[in-house]
Image: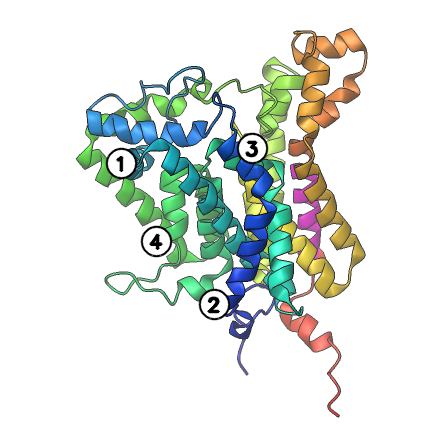
Amino acid sequence: MRCPSRHNGGVTSSSRAAPRTWAVPILIVLVGTVPLAYAFLLSPDSGHWMVDLRVYREAGISLLDGRAVYDHVTPPPQELPFTYPPFAALLAIPLAWVPFTVLGWIWFYAQLVAIVVTVRIAAAPLLARVERHGVVWGLLALAITYTLPVTDGLRFGQVNAFLVLAVLIDVARPDLVRRIRLPGGFPLHGVLVGLATAIKLTPGVFIIYFLVTRQWRAAATSIVTVAVSIVGVLLIAPRLSLDFWTDALFASDRLGHNDGTANQSIRAVILRVGPEGTLGTLLLLGLIAVVVIIGYAAAKRAYDHHELLLAFTLVAMVGVLVSPVSWSHHFHWLLPGVCWLVARGFVTRDRRVIAAGAAVWLILTLHITWWAHWRLMGNGHAVFDRHLATGNPLWAVPHNALALVGLLTLFGLARMAWTTPKVEDRQRSAPTPSRR
């Protein structure tokens, strides 16, 4: 008897989309995002247009011109420094060869394609069971595109869409990546997580996931990939590497105001609402410990039950919540989980799961944190002072909405991981279809 492969709830190769099917969701997304293209490409705010993409491109220009990457900032009014590891700076060199306006258009639509592929993987259990699944696929992708993390990514030219997709493929589709062989016969499994970690560090939470789930070869491959990137850049550009690993890495203020509204990590919430000092530090460490323990334990359980999309979402939320800085667009990591919740709800006909996925989507779509921001900061006072001035500390709840929904989602998904039966058990309990 063949054991079921470790993929998304038993989706087989027969559910793969025919090449012509891809045209339908892509067309739906292209047409549905015309308002975003108009706002972000045709009539953009010049002060914010592709500001993050400009940061990446300026790093490539700095390397080509011989200037210090981590000392340089983008032109006014943003004046943003490059904060990524040295490997990312090397990858940014090709960006310097493309005119910035052209690059912005390419980056915008490349993100949309990445989202379409991400939704295809995350919603696979549903798309394998519905007719006209190209339409369903496209509508889901369009709904995801209008969430705050994605619209911010499109507006600022962020890299999250590509990192999320790479890690999602590596973690949720090991059957695919194991078939792809690298030079020397090594499988791709683990390489994408390693590359994502070398670019932005935080995907390193998935290396820990490989270790927790005893995927030893994938973990070793990821670690070796990161090590090769570090050593390789050190040999090619030693000054660049030393500047980052001995200085820039530890300067969290380079990332912006850590207590600002856009930062929705656990640490940011404590910085905004207290307590301060030793008590605040102990609370932060305690919450991080709870998130890490619950998140990885539940991810291990999900992996053992062949629920790889669930495991991905749990680990992604651990990374977003415990990171010192998690901007609103970093919650892009939660979006595959939203798709999975909706797909799981429809497949199992569980309205509560569908409602949970819809609720998370709604909170990620509405700009709740910014509504609260303007309510709290309207008179120019700090957040805590504003609480005292209005006598209404409940404004702190919507002000930290993304962090709170991240915590609630993590705990809710952890509960699902511990209560969902194994794939084999679900298949044995499913009714046998009648044959007439």
Mark 4 Cα-neighbour bin, 10 Å: few <14, some 14–19, many ≥20: many
Q: Which residue is mark 1?
A: 97
User: What residue sits 63% from the left and 40% below the top?
Assistant: 147
The alpha-carbon separation of the residues under discs 1 and 3 comes to 26 Å
User: What residue sits 61% from the left and 59% below the top?
Assistant: 137
Q: Is residue 146 visible?
A: yes
CB atoms of marks 2 and 3 within 8 Å: no
Q: Which residue is mark 3?
A: 39
CB atoms of marks 1 and 4 within 8 Å: no
User: Circle 1 sits in a helix, a strand or a loop, which is it?
Assistant: helix
Mark nearest the camera among 1 and 4 is 1
Q: Which mark is residue 19?
A: 2
Q: Which residue is mark 4?
A: 221
Give the mark, 4 or 2, whose residue is nearer the N terminus: 2
Q: Quadrant of residue 321?
A: top right
The one nearer the camera, 102 or 121, is: 102
The one nearer the camera, 352 or 44, is: 44
Mark 1 Cα-neighbour bin, 10 Å: few <14, some 14–19, many ≥20: few
Residues drawn in magenta: 405-418
User: Circle 2 sits in a helix, a strand or a loop, which is it?
Assistant: helix
Q: Which mark is residue 393?
A: none
Relative vertical location of residue 315 with respect to residue 82 in this rendering, above or below: below
